[in-house]
Structure formats: structure tokens, C-alpha cells
Amino acid sequence: MTFQLTMYPATDGDCLLVRWGKQDAYHHIIVDLGRGATWKTVKPIFGALKNIELFTISHVDSDHVAGAVPMVREAKAPFDPLRVWFNARQQLERAQLRGKIEPFSPAEGEKLSRGIQKFRWPRNEMFGSKVVSTDSPEAKGWIEIADGLRLLLLSPDDTSLAALLPTWDAELKKAGIRPFDPDEDDFDDDGKFEPLAGIPDVLDLAKTAFEPDPSASNGSSIAFVLEWDGKRLMLTGDSHSDVIEKRLRPFAEAEGGKFKVDLLKVAHHGSHGNTSKALFEMIDCQRFAFSTDGSRRHGHPHQETIARILSNDPDRVKALYFNYDGPHSKVWKNQLLANKWKYKAVFPGANEPGTLSVDV
């Protein structure tokens, strides 16, 4: 029996696969497709999968959606998902009409929308409003997916979706939509990294004031908990901490104040503005995954986030999983630091940079 998260090479982005069940009958969820070049890597992998229960693009930041552009240019659908979740302009508008009031790519989002239509994939069909939102009635509690796995939607809410609408329209007008644009996204980083200085001072870093991520695009991110065979995996996309906290609070209270999580895929690649100390205090978790190469555009994962993790639970053994051995993750290899704060840092093999599988 398997319940596993795999992070694939997506440079500074996300491309994730969740697998569960018996070896001869696995079920799968695909989350995001990373940068434009990511699709070439994962195409043969995803194309060979059966029982794809859900394919979701969490939001339209290029490091999550750009890989979908070459995918939808395929002559036929490369895989066959039972469900597709993706919020584009129409869903933002519907969220706004329901009474609610970073570089990202609406252009790529619109291309994905057209591709979903071309492939005749069932988009957001389980939601009567066709909006993937915690304010949709169908998302009030746990959602049954397949083979005993159930899903609790954490983000976005209608307010977060509606907030993105003005920016979406402005960016779309600026970019234009041309069906034969190149597949490459606008990521032009030269691969270099910001220098890091010395060994992190965990206590000082943990005291740094939390400044919430202001990005409307990140606020629209789809995030959820998956529960199977008594284990829980939390996938937070680039979601905002306050949205997750508000949604999770009653479920944490029902479990005595802390919501049990066996593996947390940390929000926004470990950015210091997306996971507050309050959220770490709300969950009972000892294992944390980070998907990013730490390229200098963002410098993820930020040391403040990892310091919050370590200082929040200093007495129990913790695990930090990094899918790239970059300078912003490698700094946590220090054995003296690991002994002091009771954690182990796990990295992919030398021959598989960017790919790391973690059992939940």
C-alpha cells in the first residue's frame, strides 16, 4: 500500500504527483506543471498514468502554469483525468458576482482554458457554480475522491478569487492572447543564486515579524488536505496563510486544538510571507517538503520559514525534504545545526536533481 508525494523538476515552481493505493491499481492526482520546460520531463511519466482522479492547476503564476502551454498544444489529450480543477477569469467573475468583493500569467491561464475545452476535460464539474472555492457548498466538508481518499479544500475563498479579477484583466490586455505564441514562459533567470552568509541563527530568524504575502494571484491558489489510510498530506500551493488558518481553525478545534498533518508541502516554496507562526501552531506536523531550486528571483525557501518550523517544535525530530540541492536548501545540511534543532534534511540523489518522492 502506497501514499506518496513526488516533486518533479520545475526550477522555482511546482509540479507534483500524488499516488495512493495498491501497486497494481494506483490512483493519482497531478498538481501544477511548473515552468515551460517542465512538460518535456513529465510528459512520458504522466502520459503513462492510469486512474488520474484529479488534475489541478493551483493558480496562474508562471512557475505553476507555464508547463501547461506546451501540454495543450498536443494534438490529443496526453492523459485522461476524471476531474479537472482550474479557476480562470470566468470563475473569478462568478466568485465576485456571488456577493464577495508577482508576475503571473493570465495569458497562459487563458491558453490552458482553451486547451481544457479542446481536450473535452471535465472542468470544475463537481461544483454547481463551476468555481473551486471554499465558499462553494460542495466544499463545506470532506470530498470523497477514490479508493478511500478524501479531500478537504483549504483555499481559495470567493474574496481571494474576486480580488484577482482587476489585475487579471489588466495583465490580459497588456499581454494579448495570440494562439501561436512561443511555449516558453517569461522566466529569464540566468541560473545564478544570491550568496548566503554563515549558519542560520534560528532563534533570531524565528523572531522576524510575519509580513503577509500581498499577491492577489497567490491568494487565488487552490490548496487542500488529502487523507488516506489514516495519513494526511497538505498541499498548500502559493496560498495565503490567513485564508488557510480561517478555513482550518474549526477542524483543528474539533481535534483538540491541533490539526494532524503527516506531511506538509510548504506554501509558496517556503516563502516567509505565506506560512505564519500561527499556522504552524495550528497543525501537528513533523515533516515538511519544499519544491524549488532556490533561483535568485525568489531565494526560496526563506530561512525565516524554516526557523519558524524548527522553533515551533524544538523537542521532536523533524524532517525537511528538498527537491533541489541548491544553496538556499543546502545551508540546512549543517550537522551541528541539525543536532541542536533535532531535524534531518533530505535531498534527491545526484542523478535526479529536482525529483524527490516522499512517503506520507
Image (cartoon, grey):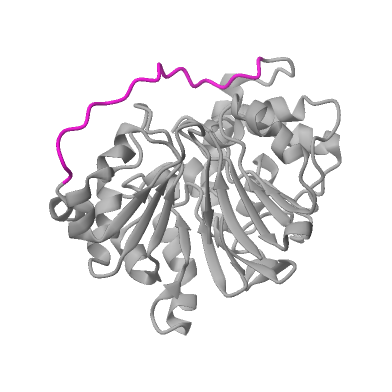
Instruction: Identify which residue, 253 or 89, lies in the foreground.
Output: 253
Q: Is residue 341 magenta?
A: no
- Residue in the foreground of this view, choosing between 210 and 359: 359
Expressed as whole percent of the image width and height from the top left, the position of residue 149 reads: 68, 68
Q: Quadrant of the N terminus?
A: bottom right
| Residue at (84% x, 37% y) in the render | 119
Residue 306 appears left or right of 89: left
Residue 151: image location, x then y, percent:
63, 65
Q: Up-down: is 176 above or below 230?
A: above
> Is residue 222 visible from the viewing direction of this image?
no
274 sits left or right of 33 in the view:
left
Q: Would you say 21 lies left or right of 255 here?
A: right
Task: State whether residue 30 appears in this view.
Answer: yes
Name the chief secondary structure element in magenta: loop
Seen from the viewer's position, the closer of residues 81 and 341 is 341
Image quadrant assignment for residue 314: bottom left
Q: Which residues are magenta?
A: 182-200
